[in-house]
Amino acid sequence: MKKERVRAVPARKPFRWHIPLFLAPAVLVYTAIMILPLFATLNLSLFNLTEARERVFVGLANFATLFGDPRWADAFWNALANNGWFFVVHMLVQNPIGILLAALLSSPRLRGAAFYRTAIFIPTILSFVIVGFVWKLILSPIWGIAPGMLDFVGLKSLFAPWLGKEEYALTTLALISVWQFVGIPMMLIYAALLSIPDEVLEAAEMDGITGASQFWKIKLPLILPSIGIISILTFVGNFNAFDLIYVSQGALAGPDFATDILGTFLYRTFFGFQLQLGDPHMGATIATAMFGIILVGVCIYLFAIQTRLRRYQF
Amino acid sequence: MATRTPISRSIAAHAVLITYTLIALFPVFVIVINSFKSRRAIFNDPLAVPTAETFDLVGYATVLKQGDFFQYFLNSMTVTVASLFFVLLFGAMAAFALSEYRFKGNLLMGLYLALGIMIPIRLGTVAILQLMVASGLVNTLTALVLVYTAQGLPLAVFILSEFMRQVSDDLKNAGRIDGLSEYRIFFTLVLPLVRPAMATVAVFTMIPIWNDLWFPLILAPAEETKTITLGSQVFIGQFVTNWNAVLAALSLAIVPVMVLYLIFSRQLIRGITAGAVK
């Protein structure tokens, strides 16, 4: 009898109150402000107002409207296509430049590496308001910095009011965004390159693999996981972008919606603009569509890309 | 290895880096020098540095007279510092619980908190606004602090728990033997040791909060709660044709972030290269 009690005591551990106490504030704030509103938004997309301004459950009818009704669908597919192009420009320009800069920065005994790193990262810390207006001023035909500089190299005929032309505006904005954010891939790749152990590189040198071929054959395969992370960060960031377009082109994402992306489309729909009233239900529907797009992208990354990338443990 | 690198390649590397540095800094440079020039000089020779005869502070005078920039700055400061405090405190507490103790649902809780790294909080805006309207927090700085705290927590928990796993168990167990409570262990032993990681998280959390336009625009657009980002956006929108004022406002908006960045930049780079976000 006595023996049993002795054994029973350690089996019943006292509840460790400190664990929930440590977790509570973060979990509460995160759940209340982030997770619940997110699900409330997803839920709201299943409702709409009747003629009598009563809220009724409409199932997926809002989505049918968004994807099929010409009044909404044209704007939606336009925003989605623009957003896709916005992402493509980032993948093709921002990430290769970031990798190139990181590769150069990480070359051994490069003088002034800290200065370059600090300077190139500066645009990333500036707010969209600054970036948007700075480039608007520089590209402005009135002020003439861009035409003046093109004139200087004899290419003045190439100048056009890029932000005002339908065919160039979106690409120009994407490139401005690339200018702003190139510091992020640069830093992450730089960190990944620094973590490659010297022994690996020395072994490569022994085999006569140096310079550019060392980069392509040894370093690039080793930093592929980082490139994967950068791609998915770029994807999430791009399909969530809003500020730069709003600041430089306004909520109407002119000229003639040529720079409209999902973020500005959501803003206009939810809050209304000019004569159109705001519509929380369609706004929630667009947010849900964006949620779906981002979720699909993240899942593709997690299950299709990340699991196939070989990770090397040093 | 460097001894074997040909000089020509090193020159080429510097050439590329210098070129890109110029591209990165040029727009900022143009804005700042022109903000100190008279209107005529801005248009006549945009690329010249201000000289004695073109030097003019009229833009700054307009900005300081018209916009309530000091108030905006104070609002931004309040929101950023308060959010940062809560993100770091709550984030570190949760990270400690996740990295230190084994309990049922540990992994699941970690995944739940990490979800927010990939899913942007903006998608919940519609419901967040309804929530803030219902609780009467619209046009208060509290609303912004709450939202930014929630926004910053996932990454903070993720990075900090990676770092806390590296804190030696022996140290914590020595503390336990000496009779320290779990709270004392966290606040007096572990927190000071992860200070570098906290600084990294602070920088990563601070920049998007300071620069955010979306939530101030939606949750707190009133005059007395405008942040500096929203304030300068509105100001520039009103003064589009007054180039002196626009350039001065832009320069004033650049300076605070720039100073903070230069203070923290070494910490930021050390944090990244130490493997916090690899």
Image (tube, grey):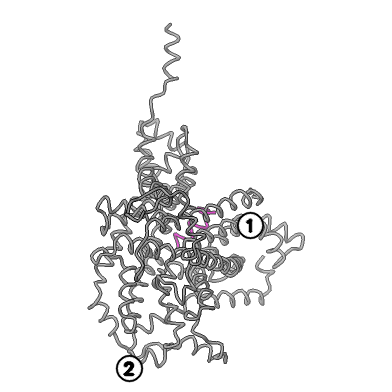
Q: Position of residue A150 (x, y in %)?
A: 53, 88
Q: Nearer the viewer, mark 1 or mark 2?
A: 1
**Residue A59 circle label:** none
The answer to whether residue B172 is left or right of residue B140 is right
Q: Position of residue A240 (x, y in %)?
A: 47, 61
> Which residue is identified by label 1?
A224
> Which residue is identified by label 2?
B53
Q: Position of residue A157 (x, y in %)?
A: 56, 91
The answer to whether residue A64 is left or right of residue B33 is right
Snapshot quadrant of residue B231: bottom left
Looking at the rendered structure, the kind of residue marked 1 is: Leu
The answer to whether residue A220 is left or right of residue A31 is right
| Crowd band around label 1 with a 10 angstrom C-alpha radius: few (<14), some (14–19), many (20+) | some
Furthest-front residue in this view: A51
Q: Is residue A113 magenta?
A: no
Snapshot quadrant of residue B74: bottom left
Q: Secondary structure at mark 1?
A: helix
Tell me the chain of label 2.
Answer: B
State the count of labels. 2
> Magenta segment range?
B266-278
Q: Nearer the viewer, residue B15 or B169?
A: B15
Q: Position of residue A88 (x, y in %)?
A: 58, 67
Placement of the N terminus of chain A among the 4 image quadrants: top left
